[in-house]
Image (cartoon, rainbow, N blue to C red):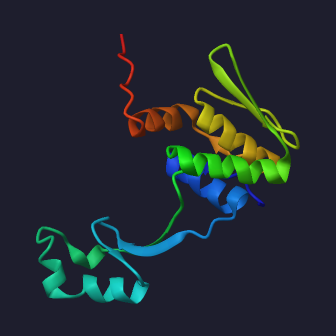
Amino acid sequence: MSHTPRVTTVAELDALVGEFVVAEKPEIYWEDSHGTFQFDTEEAARKAIHDPYYQNFLPDVDWSGTIVRQVRSYRPYIADPVAFWKMITAASEQYGALRLSRERGEWCAVFDKGTETRALSAQIAVCLAALAAKGIFPDVDHSRLERQLGLILGEPEPVQS
C-alpha cells in the first residue's frame, strides 16, 4: 500500500482487514447516490435512475443529479464475533500468535511479527494489530470509531456533563 489510508468508520476498517488480512473477495454492487436502491451492475443502476416508473419511488428527488457508485462490502469483522475470530485465525496463521492485554483502560494487541497497537476496544486494537503486522498503519479517528462501534453493539453513549 503506497499511501496511508484514513479510517473514520467501522466499515472502512472492516474493508482494510477484509482486503489485506483475510484476502476476502468483497460483495460488489452499485447504488444510487440517494442510497436507497442497490443493483447488480452499473448498467442496471443507470437504466433504473432514468426510468420514470423507478423515479416514482422517490418523487421528491431531483434525479438529474443522481450519481451511481460502486460499493465493495466486506464482512463486519469488528462487530461480528464469528467474522472477528476468522480474522484472528487468518492473521495468526500469517503473523504468529496474538497477544492481547489491557493497560490503563486501553487494549494492547500485537501479533508476533507486528507492532503493538492500542485502542479502547479489543476488537479495534486487534484489527489494527493485524494490519500493522501486514505493514499497514492507517490514520485512525479513534473517537469516531469507538463511538460508532458502541452504537453498533448497542452500548449507551456516555452522558456529557
Residue at far top of view: 161
Compared across the picture, whether 35 is left or right of 126 comes to left
Compared across the picture, whether 94 is left or right of 40 comes to right
Percent position of residue 160, x then y: 36, 15
The number of callouts visible is: 0
Of the 4 image quadrants, the one containing the N terminus is bottom right
* Residue at horizontal 62 percent and vertical 40 percent from the top: 140
Q: Nearer the viewer, residue 116 or 9?
A: 116
Compared across the picture, whether 23 is left or right of 142 comes to right
Compared across the picture, whether 82 is left or right of 104 comes to left
* Residue at horizontal 34 percent and vertical 68 percent from the top: 33
* Residue at horizontal 85 percent and vertical 45 percent from the top: 96
Percent position of residue 132, x then y: 78, 45
Say whether residue 157 is visible: yes
Q: Quadrant of residue 112?
A: top right
* Residue at horizontal 36 percent and vertical 25 percent from the top: 156
Percent position of residue 143, x then y: 52, 31
Percent position of residue 83, x then y: 57, 51
Q: Nearer the viewer, residue 65 or 27?
A: 27
Residue 71 against residue 108 in the figure, above or below: below
Q: Quadrant of residue 151?
A: top left
Q: Nearer the viewer, residue 55 or 27?
A: 27
